[in-house]
Image: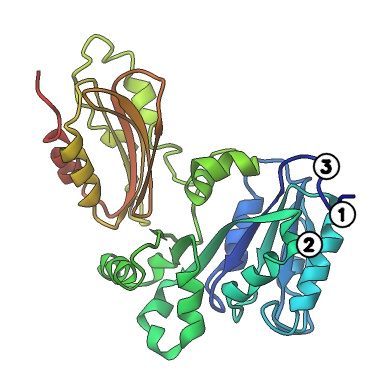
Amino acid sequence: MKNSLTPQGEEKVGIILLAGFLGSGKTTLLKKILSWETDLSDTVVLVNEFGDIGIDGALLKNSGSDVVELTSGCICCTLAADLKQSIQNIWKRFKPRRIFIEATGVADPASVVSVLKEPKIHEIMTLKKIITVLDADYWEAREVFGPLFYSQLETADLILLNKVDLIDKIKIPQFLDEIHQVIPNSQVIPTFHCGVDPETLWKVTHNEDLGIKPIHFFHNSSADHGLHEKDQQNHDHESTVIHDHSTESTDATNYVAFSFQNSEPMDENCFKQFIKDLPWELFRLKGSVCFKDRTVLLNFVGGKSNWGSWDGPSETRLAFIGWESNSEKIIQKLENCIIKS
């Protein structure tokens, strides 16, 4: 007989763990996630407060999802048993499709993961992603925070280098490079107020699993807006390269969005080297890439690339998003990969 906690469907409940040192912006990120255009009736938020008074839970009460609080300790140590029991109770009471766990700033994600891997929990739920929010100022002072600080970063699937608007902008490329040197396999995105869109946060596969609609926090709505706008204009000029600077963001945030379109095939070796050489500040690149023998879908987030199948038009259509990124220089390097007919 199956355990009574086992979900009726094949899909397990998806758990997203939000980690990060004290004051890094985890609650800001969670509030932003819960404000996205999606149905939250099947979402539960589990907030872990280190102390007797729950503040973050109160801030999230009007989010449209159910909020459960654990107070007086840390879920990675004294409240581990409570975490296990709470998750089981959440399933019995709400039958959610996804659970966001906001860990206290002194929680080690590795310890939380060990609880989630226990058989009775793993039977009904699966950890989709660990997202660590890193205050940019904390990175500069990292030597004083100890092993816990690094563990929160090393266990993350995605690191949000947050509050970049509060430090000298010349430090951002330096910090991104240093983080990638210390944690070579990390995905790192610079943010302010944890501003990130769902597709970047989960990537394509998680986006579908979690039922979150892709929207964009950028002021110009979408990086590929210009592609659709100019499609008809360039329909008869398929080899035209589009330098779409009309979508660039020029406000104080220093984020830029631009696009590229071309119907001629790309040299595969050249293009893959182009991806490897992208600066860390260019953290988002998505679209189809046309090679001589096939066209593929590229999804690049925070220094990592995913390649997939593409059954659309045989052309290269790419949307770029970055921080303080030199669009002219990037497009010029990309043009060098075009195989001229």
Q: Is residue 70 visible?
A: no
Residue 121 in percent (x, y) is at 75, 61
In the rendered image, the vertical position of residue 110 relative to residue 266, given as above or below: below
Who comes first in sequence, dot 1 or dot 2? Answer: 1
- Left or right, 106 with reference to 145: right
- For the residues labelled 3 and 2, the Cα–Cα distance comes to 15 Å
Name the residue rendered at 69%, 81% in the picture: 74
- For the residues labelled 1 and 2, the Cα–Cα distance comes to 8 Å
In the depicted view, which residue is nearer to us: 125 or 228?
Answer: 125
Name the residue rendered at 46%, 71% in the picture: 153
Q: Is there a contact, CB below 8 Å, between mark 1 and mark 2? A: yes
Going by the numbered disc 1, the residue's amino acid type is Asn
- Left or right, 163 with reference to 52: left
Which residue lies most toward the front here?
1
Q: Residues within 10 Å of mark 1 (few under 14, many from 20)?
A: few
Q: Is there a contact, CB below 8 Å, between mark 3 and mark 1? A: no
Going by the numbered disc 2, the residue's amino acid type is Lys
* Element carrying mark 1: loop
Residue 295 in percent (x, y) is at 31, 25
Residue 142 in percent (x, y) is at 40, 83
Q: Which residue is mark 3?
A: 8
* Element carrying mark 2: helix
Q: Which mark is residue 120?
A: 2
Q: Which residue is mark 1?
A: 3
- For the residues labelled 3 and 1, the Cα–Cα distance comes to 11 Å
Q: Nearer the viewer, mark 3 or mark 1?
A: 1
